[in-house]
């Protein structure tokens, strides 16, 4: 099984944004793997989930590199590719006129040999409540490097367990990338219809235009909270369900006293009548430096509406308390874009060694894939943020990937 190299150095310099320094870990792509005609990716590495498949497939398409991913989701209760994983790899195959082998349900190994990316209209239906957000993670980076615009219709679950809500892309990831990475304002995302477990049938539309190159970026200054906004949604439930989520979330956020009383909290209420019953809430805090940090919670039969709102508020509070500029959901999603950017990008996030080993695995897994696919150098260090909290500083030296030509 292919592994990447870890090289540990101790540095004495202090990053300009911080007042402390710490051990720094450098990570490099394996040279033997990068020199091979087909890049070998260990799908069981660290987090060992579908993230490896999505990131590797998107990068293979952008870099026109053949890739073989083995041991896919090996340790999961249902190992191999589920419908959403299979649809994602097949979508990349269609976008690149690729040769595919192993693309079948529950397969634990797949090989992708892409040709050039091409734009157009693509429709993907998981036929389940499989996450449209996870399909977005494989389609969107690749689409930015197409020589023509792309339009996607993704059908499946929009708000499901074990995946970021579709709202997160719309409210946090896409605005962040537009602000710092140079992605065109013409790129758009529309949550046309929500889809819940078990039948899904949610609809998401994405439009992209070619991006000449991704700019390197820095998300290292948090600033103060200037507004809080979000969405509380429900389907086939009384309207007061969403109202109760908002009321309790607002109470919990105000009680935490992490921002002044005059900072507005504006969480819109959205009523739906889609295929299945469901509800949830997404809350985002925007800072004076433009950072977006979120908290969210999904309703369940045994979870009363006020507690769902409380869960989302506490999730956001945890992200506001740590002092970093990105939340635990954004940090691993940024890695692919950092690796493709034309220069060094960096961000600060929570000190996951102490607080959140599971999301550490997600980010370390993303770093593993970009190192194997791109040969980038990355580092992680522990520093002190302006509020005195220990945070992680993550840096990636991007390769300056170029868009494909028609």
Image (tube, helix red, strand yellow):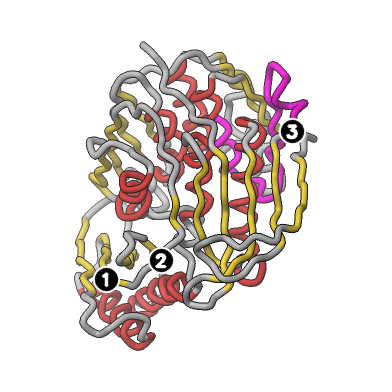
Indicate whether residue 319 is drawn in magenta: no
Residue drawn at (32%, 78%), measured in percent from left and top? Answer: 249
Can residue 302 be seen at all in this image of the molecule? no
Q: Which residue is mark 2?
A: 222
In primary-sequence order, the first of circles 3 and 1 is 3
Mark nearest the camera among 2 and 3 is 2
Q: Position of residue 17 (x, y in %)?
A: 50, 63
In primary-sequence order, the first of circles 2 and 3 is 3
Q: Nearer the viewer, residue 23 or 121?
A: 23
Residue drawn at (70%, 39%), measured in percent from left and top? Answer: 28
338 relative to 182 in the view: left or right: right
Q: Which residue is mark 1?
A: 226
Q: Position of residue 344 (x, y in %)?
A: 52, 42
81 relative to 215 in the view: left or right: right
Callout 3: helix, strand or loop?
loop
Q: Position of residue 210 (x, y in %)?
A: 32, 26
> In the image, which residues are magenta?
30-57
Occupied quadrant, residue 376: top right
Q: Position of residue 234 (x, y in %)?
A: 27, 63
171 relative to 381 in the view: left or right: left
Quarter of the figure with the C terminus = top left
Q: Residues within 10 Å of mark 1 (few under 14, many from 20)?
A: some
Callout 1: helix, strand or loop?
strand
Q: Nearer the viewer, residue 378 or 13?
A: 13
Mark sitting on residue 30? 3
Residue drawn at (41%, 53%), measured in percent from left and top? Answer: 197
Quarter of the figure with the N terminus = top right
Query: Tags 3 and 1 in contact by the CB under 8 Å rule?
Result: no
In the rendered image of this protein, does residue 15 appear above or below residue 20? above
Q: Residues within 10 Å of mark 2 (few under 14, many from 20)?
A: many
């Amino acid at each position: 099984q292919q592994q990447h190299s870890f090289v540990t150095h101790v540095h004495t310099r202090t990053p300009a944004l911080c007042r402390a320094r710490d051990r720094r870990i450098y990570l490099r792509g394996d040279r033997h793997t990068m020199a091979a005609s087909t890049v070998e990716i260990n799908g069981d590495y660290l987090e060992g989930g579908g993230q490896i498949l999505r990131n590797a497939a998107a990068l293979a398409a952008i870099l026109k590199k053949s890739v073989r991913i083995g041991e896919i989701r090996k340790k999961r209760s249902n190992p191999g590719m589920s419908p959403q994983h299979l649809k994602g790899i097949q979508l990349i195959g269609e976008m690149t006129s690729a040769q595919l082998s192993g693309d079948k349900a529950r397969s634990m190994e797949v090989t992708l040999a892409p040709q050039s990316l091409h734009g157009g209209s693509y429709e993907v239906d998981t036929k389940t409540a499989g996450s449209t957000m996870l399909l977005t993670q494989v389609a969107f980076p690749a689409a930015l490097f197409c020589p023509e615009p792309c339009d996607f219709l993704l059908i499946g679950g929009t708000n499901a367990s074990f995946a970021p809500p579709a709202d997160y892309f719309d409210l946090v990831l896409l605005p962040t990338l537009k602000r710092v990475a140079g992605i065109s304002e013409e790129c758009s995302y529309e949550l046309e219809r929500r889809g819940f477990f078990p039948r899904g049938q949610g609809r998401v539309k994405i439009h992209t235009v070619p991006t000449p190159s991704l700019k390197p970026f820095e998300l290292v200054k948090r600033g103060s909270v200037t507004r809080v906004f979000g969405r509380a949604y429900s389907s086939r439930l009384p309207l007061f369900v969403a109202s109760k989520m908002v009321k309790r979330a607002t109470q919990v956020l105000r009680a935490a006293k992490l921002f002044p009383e005059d900072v507005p909290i504006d969480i819109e209420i959205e009523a739906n009548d889609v295929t299945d019953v469901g509800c949830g809430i997404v809350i985002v805090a925007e800072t004076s430096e433009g950072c977006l940090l979120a908290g969210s919670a999904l309703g369940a039969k045994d979870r009363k509406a006020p507690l769902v709102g409380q869960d989302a508020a506490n999730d956001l509070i945890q992200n506001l308390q740590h002092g970093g500029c990105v939340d635990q959901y954004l940090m691993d999603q940024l890695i692919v874009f950092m690796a493709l950017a034309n220069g060094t990008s960096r961000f600060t996030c929570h000190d996951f060694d102490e607080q959140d080993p599971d999301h550490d695995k997600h980010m370390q897994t993303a770093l593993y894939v970009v190192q194997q696919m791109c040969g980038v150098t990355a580092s992680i260090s522990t520093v002190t943020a302006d509020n005195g909290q220990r945070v992680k500083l993550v840096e990636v030296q991007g390769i300056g990937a170029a868009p494909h030509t028609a």
